[in-house]
Image (cartoon, rainbow, N blue to C red):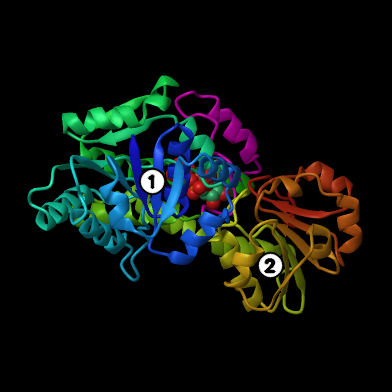
Amino acid sequence: MKISVLGCGYVGLVSGACFADFGDTVLCADLDETRIAALERGDIPIFEPGLEQIVASNTQSGRLSFTTDVPRAVREADVVFIAVGTPTRRGDGHADLSYVYAVAETISKSLTGYTVIVTKSTVPVGTGDEVERIVRQGNPDADFSVVSNPEFLREGAAIEDFKRPDRIVVGTDDPRARDVMTEVYRPLFLNRSPLLFVSRRTAELTKYASNGFLAMKITFINELADLCEAVGADVQDVARGIGLDNRIGPKFLNAGPGFGGSCFPKDALALVKTAQDYDSPVRLVETTVSINDNRKRTMAQKIIAACGGDVSGRTIALLGLTFKPNTDDMREAPSIAIVQALQAGGATIRAFDPQGMQAAAALFDGVHYAEDAYDAADGADAVVIVTEWELFRALDLARIKELLRTPVMIDLRNIYRPSEMKQLGFYYSSIGRPNDAHGRST
Ligand code: UDX
């Protein structure tokens, strides 16, 4: 099967490399010459565990190659995956589909023979219809099908999620396209990953419904965490207690500073806008979005409260800046609102993140980037765990305490236990645990 992937970003590169790893011949195309040149050198522009190796091995085997010549990529393919960006459009929260529609134009002029055009990017309901119209208009005689095949990849676990998906969703009513997509996913199908064939619009909506539900589930436990603090309960025990119900499940019940990333915020907002456009609002997701936005700001208040209500002239150490571990992605990370609020309160910020500091440097002014967690804590009045990197799970807490000016830790990911921290002499504040009169987690 000859596959072309248009767009060598996070989704396109992972998808292309994994299809090549199945034995397909894959041509990844991108208009960004610098990006293509880097990929041809084996330089991967994103941090994703395992991606460098899988790209290198399949490039060496000749199954995976790169080009800026998008028309050639279309001409040579049986299946063309559209994996270009669909960022949130400035101002109104809709998904910006200009890159999708531009590449559809290019495809229409380059088709040779029956081709399946697949929207892999997350696109609003009805986008496949528009892509089909654009291609038909550009090339009335072309023989093609437009299919929706949304991705469910988590950053930091993308290759695992691609190769062992919970399900593959394919949106088409065309039997020929169905046969081609069954062939494309045969390696996974043989692993017994369910291959769901649904209508194109159903597949498009399924992606948003999935992310909207997951964002809502996280927000549910985050609100429960606040209630736990108020009533003196423990949110991790509540999460375990409800998660053992197999209708709920244990995953995505870790209370924290709010969800971030390039998907949940963008997709939840796009779902809300689509629903409003069709006059069928999804009010639960609307509320999820507003609660989550507000939560990131209230996290800064939690830090300020733990520092006695005022951080002016104080130094605060942040451990973790990325929106989650095992990524270098800073998009919509809770750390952004936290840094802004603390600096507005007059604090000086020292920060360490294993992968995110380069991306963070473009976002923040006046932040001191430390060598490691201990360097960050050195001379600080408080240390805050913002992202639950493995590195922060077994810190030498006695050494951290020595380095801090005052032994204050605010743990936004509940990595440590209140009893242990109290024993070590920390003022320890965390998420969703009972508080004492001074706001310390007990
Ligand atoms: C998500 C979806 O999981 C994936 O299926 C989709 O294709 C893309 O969006 P991703 O954004 O990479 O993946 O990260 P994910 O692991 O889902 O975490 C998203 C956010 O939720 C992060 O900010 C994370 O910190 C937060 N989160 C996740 C929690 O706060 N608690 C949890 O229990 C899980």
Instruction: Classify mark 2: helix, strand or loop.
Output: helix
User: Residue visible at 15% across and 56% down?
Assistant: 134
- Three-letter code for the amino acid on which mark 1 is drawn: Gly
As drawn, is 225 to the left or to the right of 316? left
Of mark 2 and mark 1, the one earlier in the sequence is 1
As drawn, is 75 to the left or to the right of 329? left
User: Residue visible at 44% across and 52% down?
Assistant: 66
Residue holding disc 2: 304
Asked if 363 appears above or below 210 in the picture, the reply is below
User: Residue visible at 32% across and 28% down?
Assistant: 183
- Find out if the beta carbon at label 1 lies less than 8 Å from the nearest ligand 1 atom: no
Nearest the eye: 304 or 178: 178
Distance from Cα at disc 2 to Cα at disc 1? 31 Å
Nearest the eye: 84 or 140: 140
Q: Percent position (x, y) of residue 47?
A: 59, 53
User: What residue range appears in magenta?
Assistant: 231-259
Q: Quadrant of residue 330?
A: bottom right
Q: Percent position (x, y) of residue 347?
A: 71, 75
Q: Quadrant of the N terminus?
A: top left
Q: Quadrant of the C terminus?
A: top right
User: Residue visible at 24% across and 38% down?
Assistant: 202
Nearest the eye: 355 or 247: 355
